[in-house]
Amino acid sequence: MISCAPVFPYYVVCLYYHNTGPNMAEFEQEHLFCFGLGFTASKLCEALRADGWQTSGTVRSMRRRRQIRAHHDKVHLFSPTKPLSSLEEVLTDVTHLLVSVRPLAPEETLTNMLDPILNLHADDLLNHADSLQWVGYLSSTVVYGDHSGKWVDESSELRTKQDRGLRRIEAERRWLTLWKEFGLPVHVFRLSGIYAAGRSAIDSVKSGKATLIDKPGHFTSRVHVEDIVQVLRASMAQPAPGSIYNVADDLPCEQREPLEFAADLLGQPKPPTLAFEDLEDGSFRRSFMIENRRVRNDAIKEQLGVTLKYPTFREGIRAIASVAS
């Protein structure tokens, strides 16, 4: 029997009820499929392949596909204007699915397509609701908005007034609806600022492009990509559909602190300082500094048993500096 319900405002999804067979299909090998083989997803795939997993996913361009196809079992082209021709076939032996495609801004699409995956492939995903053991959606802590520097956890009010934050809130809601109403095992991960070798305070200082923003009492949160990977793997090992996890380190701090620490490690002068008031209106840096909060990470420790490899920026930056030197 097929039952259709208008869950989302822009399309109708259909759930196929299966009357026979186990709740989860058994496969010989675990297989992660990633919508969006970007930086974080690629790091996760690298770790899983070392443990014998299959990995596959999507990219937006042929150039990117040529760059990474040797590192995965299959790489497919996908974009808001190029849906997968046969996702049903692609997902045949997939056990886990990661979504790292961000919601679209109105100017990026000709249609009102907030989340291209849900708009184009929701029914395909629901057809596999009983065989997918875990679905992870990568969101952002931007959803919390401004809390005047106070601590926020997964139950805190979502106060953001920024467009990118509002899009994240709506995308989270739509993905979690697939769990609440249709049983797709969705988990939401609200990521703080991601850093790693090649994209860290060390690299910024070395490039000469680092700038300290003078805004005392404004907190930022961050997390090393290796800790994101271990959080995702811990969740995959003990699924709890409907869960939301903040992914951040233990030490929210002012924007200038990691850069000053990196400069000291490198034996370089501190980067120049720019007043917050002098940041260009509408710039990403200004929007990043408008909302002030400290992000709690208790859930990943208490519920998933994670011990952070880099509990503060100091451990992470030292590790990066030691490799770079």
Image (cartoon, rainbow, N blue to C red):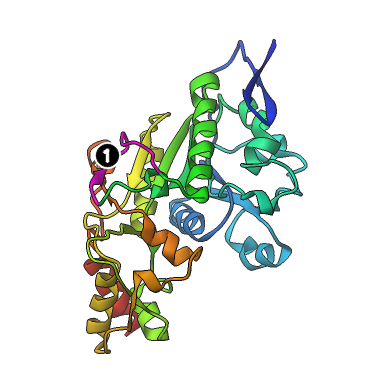
Residue at image point 68% right, 66% down? 66
Q: Which residue is mark 1?
A: 299
Residue 12 or residue 16, whichever sits in front: 12
Predominant secondary structure, magenta span:
loop
- Please give left or right for residue 51 compared with residue 149 in the image: right
- In x, y percent, where is residue 86? 75, 39
Q: Is residue 44 above or below residue 25?
A: below
Residue at image point 38% right, 39% down? 158
Disc 1 element: helix
- In x, y percent, where is residue 72? 59, 56
Magenta stretch in the rendered image: 149-159
Circle 1: residue type = Ala
- Please give left or right for residue 160 compared with residue 215 in the image: right
Indicate yes or no whether the magenta region holds residue 213. Answer: no
Which residue is outermost to the bottom? 268
Residue 225 in sight: no
Residue at image point 22% right, 38% down? 302
Indicate the quadrant containing the C terminus: top left, top right, bottom left or bottom right.
Answer: bottom left
